[in-house]
């Protein structure tokens, strides 16, 4: 298998993620977090409670796909961190979204303005 095929296969996995799973990856792109912190970030984004029964199975799926690494902070608390593969998945998603959104110079300027406002 060529390197290009390997990259496409890895990107393909990320492209099959649910929006909820993609949002978890984006949250973890900021920094490693424990489950409750991820839950709070999701609740802030969605404006509603996120059930533990929804969050943790999705985190486990992302760990199984090697997009997120899970480590134990203590006996009750796990920390989740984006892997390099997860990082690549976030970039792949952003690249795809930008390829659809940035259709002219005006939209390119809008994206540049958003980025500049965050730097």
Image: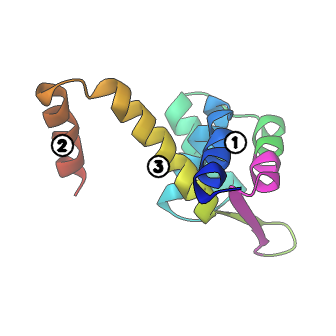
Q: How is the image coloured?
A: rainbow
SS of the residue under disc 1: helix
Question: Considering only order in the chain, which callout, 3 or 2, is on the residue closer to the N terminus?
Answer: 3
Magenta residues (range): 59-73
- Identified at 17% across, 50% down, the residue is 116
Which quadrant of the structure image shows residue 87?
bottom right
- Quadrant of the snapshot with the C terminus: bottom left
| Residue 18 position (above or below residue 78) | above
Furthest residue in direction right, as rendered: 75
| Label 1 crowd (10 A; few <14 / some 14-19 / many >=20) | few
74 horizontally vs 85: left or right: right
Report x, y in % for residue 6. Answer: 66, 54
Instruction: Give the residue at mark 3.
Output: 91
Foreground label between 1 and 2? 1
- Decide: is 113 above or below 105: below
Disc 2 designates what residue? 112
Lower position in the chain sequence, tag 1 or tag 3: 1
Q: Is residue 13 magenta?
A: no
Of residue 82 and residue 39, the one placed in the foreground of this image is 82
Label 1 – label 2 distance at C-alpha: 29 Å
Q: Position of residue 78 (x, y in %)?
A: 77, 65
């Amino acid at each position: 298998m060529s390197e290009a095929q390997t990259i496409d296969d890895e990107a393909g996995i990320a492209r099959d993620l649910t929006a909820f799973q993609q949002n978890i990856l984006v949250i973890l792109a900021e920094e490693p977090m424990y489950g409750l912190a991820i839950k709070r970030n999701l609740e802030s984004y969605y404006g509603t409670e996120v059930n533990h029964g929804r969050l943790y199975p999705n985190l486990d799926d992302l760990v199984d796909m090697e997009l997120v690494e899970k480590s134990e902070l203590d006996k009750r608390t796990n920390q989740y961190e984006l892997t390099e593969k997860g990082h690549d998945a976030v970039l792949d998603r952003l690249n795809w979204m930008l390829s659809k959104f940035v259709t002219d110079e005006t939209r390119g300027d809008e994206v540049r303005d958003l980025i500049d406002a965050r730097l």
